Amino acid sequence: MTVTSHRARLRTIAFEAMRARGLDPEFPADALAEVAALPAAPRSTTEPVRDLRSLPWCSIDNDESRDLDQLSVMDVAANGSRKVLIAIADVDAAVQKGLPVDRHAAVNTTSVYTPAMIFPMLPERLSTDLSSLGEGDDRLAVVVELTMSSQDDLTHGDVYGAIVRNRAKLTYNAVDAWLTGTGPLPAAAAAVTGMDEQLRLQDRAAQALGRARHELGALAFESVDVQFVFEGDHVREIRGRAANRAKALIENFMIAANGVVARFLDERGFPSIRRVVRSPERWDRLRELAAGSGDELPATADSKALAAFLARRQAAAPAEFADLSHSVIRLLGSGEYVVDPPGQEPPGHFGLAVRDYTHSTAPNRRYPDLITQRLIKAALARRPSPYTIAELDELASHCTRQEDAASKVERQVRKSAAALVIASRVGERFDAVVTGASPKGTFVRVTTPPIEGKVVQGEHGLDVGDRVRVQLVAVDVDRGFIDFARN
């Protein structure tokens, strides 16, 4: 009897889940033919570009990432002012609007990441090579420039085209270990003169940008990512990955860059697709959670008040903060894409405490970012917008739907992988926190091991944030079901 490997089984589940959610797991033949016909990475463009290849650029991404969307570098002037430069891969130079690769990208609108495999938005010859900012490669980019004063204030932003070269391909884990004093300077950084000081400068600038946002009411969470550890083709373990300082560095830079891009387009009379999280869907429940810990939130939604509450709880009960973060994220509701026509009041992002926020920094992985890049390049070249407002409205709605579908695929396959690992533990009891409560069901998250599942017995009266003791009663690998009973 042939035993199917976990990886093969999860791949089959992922393919079926993609199709069931209206996502295409395979590239059509005409898209693959278009990519195969490309001779090399684009090196010329109709717009003037700056030659910035001499700067000590670096990328910081996941250990396994090859689809590198951004590089960063800092330049410090004699007067103490500093410039953070963020280079974003010029994907539009290789992916022409309306051709087969673009049409397929517009179907899925995002890369989909599952434990067994990745479904990239663009064919790999593009996303991991020709349109990736790989180490040692000369690549076209859109650069977002952030000027900061000696007092750490963001004073100016600019956007322009450039040609760049990645000097050091670095990873979150290695850079985090060095920044926190638990590991050596990564070898790729040590090989570049001055890269250690570059990383220190970038870390300080990123922390300053983060502090400024939090003072305005941006919410600080502690998220725990889940990593599935394979032994050969079998998944053997589920591990939680805690907060990472290098990842926070990049997140702070990307949020700042997205704000600059949104303002750049607005100032030039261009529309944009904004990423927004509106006022929390369940503010009353957030108030109940605060009251349960002896704290208080105002009657109406207030990001500064919520940020202050989170900071107090993190200081008072750090061991419980990850669970609280997870509950608050669920209660805030999901984000969506909306169009901001030129000259109108921009929609805001409640969780980030910003009014100007688009997605622009990951055009290899997200279609809204590629749309934004085309708008930027049209503005730089003084050409009309490549999209009408009606087209952008339709694209924004479609991208929101497809991103939601992709998230559901990722959750389902993660649960299938988790079910493979914990199938032998049916009957065991766990401490859990409620992460979802709606007519669709009540869901809980267990910290050790880091798994989520549905409460199928005794769920009545539970709400998001409640702590509960549960028993694992059943798993279904193919459907991604992990079922608990309330004890």
Image: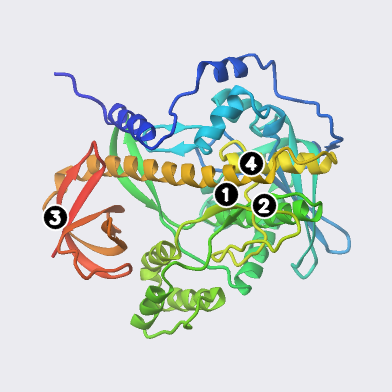
Q: Is residue 253 visible?
A: yes
Residue 309: give x, y in percent of width and height: 47, 78
Viewer-proximal residue among 133 and 169: 133
Type of the residue with mark 3: Glu
Image quadrant assignment for residue 126: top right
Task: Give me the disc on residue 391.
Answer: 4
Could you tell me if the residues under marks 4 and 3 are in contact, i.e. CB atoms within 8 Å?
no
- What is the distance, in whole Å, between disc 3 and disc 1 at their CAs? 38 Å
**Residue 175, labelled with which disc?**
1
Does the residue at mark 1 contact the one at mark 2 (Cβ under 8 Å)?
A: yes
Of circles 1 and 4, which is in front?
4
- Label 2 CA crowd tier, 10 Å (few <14, some 14–19, many 20+): many
The three-letter code of the residue at mark 4 reads Glu
Q: Which residue is mark 2?
A: 199
Rate crowding at label 1 as few (under 14), some (14 to 19) or many (20 or more) other CA atoms within 10 Å: many
Viewer-proximal residue, 92 or 433? 92
Per the model, the C-alpha gap separating discs 2 and 4 is 41 Å
Number of other residues with Cα within 10 Å of mark 4, as a class: few under 14, some 14 to 19, many 20 or more: few
Judge depth for marks 2 and 3 and give the one in front: 3
Asked whether residue 70 appears in the rendered view, the answer is: no
Look at label 1 and name its amino acid. Val
